[in-house]
Image: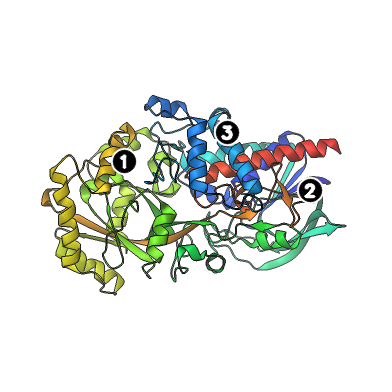
């Protein structure tokens, strides 16, 4: 068969692009190195958060949002400072994406069958000035069905195209090279991997049983980032965030290896903003791992006390849920690659959510009955399982035993009971008045002015050392790798550019491999809910642009 387009990578961006191409009548060959069980890639494992602006969900909760406010927040967060070069196309993609999020995005997704949880989350709150980093208002819309709920409509569209003969999907096909002819990308060659029954997310073998070569009118790379390749993460680690962590856990499956970045670069594609990346600071080791070094991110509310490895409380605005990379920088400057939360059961039962579709079975399975159980006393079942089985948790009815347990976990014996107690007592004294100089207390009281936080995300302010609020809980927080913010530089049609800023003929890209658009749509930081959305938007736009270009020929 003569293919119009070869799409390399069957994650979310690849599915969206393939659907757009096939429904326009183009013949698409979809290749992926993983077994069919992993169709949809890492998006399937996500919590399913999407960045939307001025949505009906926001308006029902009394949130006043607008394109202008969202763009102000995006610019203050991104901090674009390479606009004559590496950020040139990134900023153009950013402006297009925020416009999409404010106008067409929700209705378009709704037409695909995607629905949203009614309470909008408030991620990356910033804590700086109005034009600085962070979301001024809640914008984190959770898809009803989480990650699988996002993947399903696009997988359905692709499978329908497969049944019509417009798409052929070949798993276990690992692309090793982009084929060139007179400077034009004309196809791919690679290794046929041994069949595998590995379940979704599990490592699959890399044994080679043959080779393949396919040609087409164009190739689109949608192969994801480097999150599971810790060597590449460390190699590109920015000095502004201190030295690379000696020890990290992985928030993505092992197949998120970044190998197509170098392969595409060899074919002439330009990699930009390689020093920009997004890793979480609130990672816990999965007691029931699916992939190597499997880490889960805590999605925290604003109340937990955050201490560095030596037991010193972080300064403002390094509070839970405020500035991911700012806190990462603070952690790395301590010389240790972990930190601590101290909280109470009253806090954990309301403020701890765990990222990942598998950690939220009620939302993933669309069970209203199970969701309603979240308002009952006590932590959710997945959180409780970590409290009982997770190696990073300590639970105690007194502070002395808690600190002793924390020291036993690390073996470093860095924590001093009197030092920690002095800080917690000082914090608790601030609870005696409605006013305070402690900015974290001000922030958590302010959070409860938002009905969504008051209902399900921010515990009623209380004294940590009051036994009636116990038991006390400590959680060791690890650095968990996640997203690549830089990548292949692309124009607004998804064409991959070379070092001279000229499109490489026949070569397109979308998704995380492009830094979610243009080689780094987020700049230095993310407002959250923008990774899945970036895959959807770039996959859609690149697919549609390629259709237009193919129709001209």
Circle 3 packing at 10 Å, graded few (<14), some (14-19), many (20+), is some
Residue 445: percent from left, percent from top: 25, 40
Of the pair 39 and 260, the residue shown nearer to us: 260
Circle 2 packing at 10 Å, graded few (<14), some (14-19), many (20+), is many
Query: What residue sits right under mark 2 in the picture?
Result: 218
* Quadrant location of the C terminus in the rendered image: top right
Which numbered dot is residue 457?
Answer: 1
Q: Residue at x 64, y 36 (%)?
A: 157
How far is disc 1 from disc 2 in space, using C-alphas?
A: 47 Å
Asked which secondary structure carries label 2, the reply is strand
Q: Are marks 3 and 2 in contact (CB under 8 Å)?
A: no
Asked which secondary structure carries label 1, the reply is loop
Circle 1 packing at 10 Å, graded few (<14), some (14-19), many (20+), is many
Q: Residue at x 36, y 65 (%)?
A: 338
Residue 12: percent from left, percent from top: 59, 45
Asked which secondary structure carries label 3, the reply is helix
247 over 436 or under it: above or below: below
Chain-order first, disc 3 or disc 2: 3
Q: Residue at x 28, y 41 (%)?
A: 458
Query: What residue sits right under mark 3 in the picture?
Result: 99
Residue 52: percent from left, percent from top: 49, 34
**Residue 159 appears anywhere in the view:** no
Q: Residue at x 48, y 61 (%)?
A: 291
Of the pair 500 and 130, the residue shown nearer to us: 130
Chain-order first, disc 1 or disc 2: 2
How far is disc 1 from disc 3 in space, using C-alphas?
A: 28 Å
Of the pair 23 and 224, the residue shown nearer to us: 224
């Amino acid at each position: 068969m003569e293919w119009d387009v070869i799409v390399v990578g069957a994650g979310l961006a690849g599915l969206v692009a393939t659907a757009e191409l096939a429904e326009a009548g183009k013949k698409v060959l979809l290749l992926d190195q993983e077994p069919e069980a992993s169709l949809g890639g890492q998006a399937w494992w996500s919590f399913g958060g999407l960045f939307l602006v001025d949505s009906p969900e926001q308006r029902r909760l009394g949130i006043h949002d607008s394109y202008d406010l969202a763009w102000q927040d995006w610019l203050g967060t991104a901090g674009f400072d390479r606009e004559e070069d590496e950020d040139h196309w990134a900023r153009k993609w950013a402006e297009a994406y925020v416009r999409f999020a404010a106008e067409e995005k929700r209705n378009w997704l709704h037409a695909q069958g995607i629905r949203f949880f009614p309470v909008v989350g408030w991620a990356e709150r910033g804590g700086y000035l109005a034009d600085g980093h962070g979301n001024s208002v809640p914008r984190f819309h959770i898809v009803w069905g989480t990650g699988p709920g996002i993947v399903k409509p696009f997988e359905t569209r692709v499978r329908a195209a497969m049944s019509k003969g417009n798409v052929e999907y070949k798993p276990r096909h690992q692309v090793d090279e982009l084929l060139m002819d007179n400077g034009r990308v004309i196809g791919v060659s690679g290794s046929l991997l041994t069949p595998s029954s590995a379940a979704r997310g599990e490592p699959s073998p890399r044994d080679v049983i043959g080779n393949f070569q396919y040609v087409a009118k164009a190739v689109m790379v949608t192969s994801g980032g480097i999150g599971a390749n810790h060597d590449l993460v460390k190699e590109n680690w920015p000095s502004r965030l201190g030295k690379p962590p000696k020890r990290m856990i992985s928030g993505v499956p092992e197949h998120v290896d970044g190998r197509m970045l170098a392969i595409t670069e060899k074919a002439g594609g330009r990699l930009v903003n390689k020093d920009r990346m997004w890793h979480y600071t609130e990672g816990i080791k999965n007691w029931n791992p699916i992939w190597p070094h499997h880490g889960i991110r805590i999605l925290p509310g604003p109340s937990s006390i955050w201490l560095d490895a030596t037991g010193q409380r972080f300064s403002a605005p390094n509070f839970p849920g405020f500035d991911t990379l700012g806190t990462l920088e603070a952690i790395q400057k301590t010389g240790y690659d972990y930190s601590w939360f101290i909280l109470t059961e009253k806090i954990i039962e309301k403020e701890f959510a765990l990222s990942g579709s598998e950690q939220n079975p009620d939302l993933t399975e669309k069970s209203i009955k199970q969701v309603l159980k979240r308002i009952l006393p006590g932590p959710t079942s997945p959180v409780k399982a970590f409290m009982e089985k997770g190696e990073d948790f300590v639970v105690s009815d007194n502070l002395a035993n808690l600190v002793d347990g924390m020291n036993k976990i690390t073996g470093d014996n860095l924590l001093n009971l009197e030092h920690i107690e002095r800080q917690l007592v000082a914090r608790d004294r601030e609870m005696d008045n409605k006013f305070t100089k402690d900015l974290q207390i001000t922030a958590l009281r302010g959070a409860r002015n938002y009905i969504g936080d008051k209902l399900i995300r921010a515990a009623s302010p209380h004294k940590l050392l009051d036994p009636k609020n116990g038991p006390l809980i400590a959680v060791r927080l690890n650095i968990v790798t996640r997203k690549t913010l830089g990548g292949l530089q692309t124009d607004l049609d998804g064409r991959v550019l070379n070092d001279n800023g000229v499109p490489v003929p026949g070569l397109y890209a979308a998704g995380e491999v492009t830094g979610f658009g243009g080689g780094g749509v987020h700049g230095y930081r993310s407002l959250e809910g923008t990774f899945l959305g970036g895959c959807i938007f770039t996959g859609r736009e690149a697919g549609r642009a390629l259709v237009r270009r193919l129709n001209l020929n």
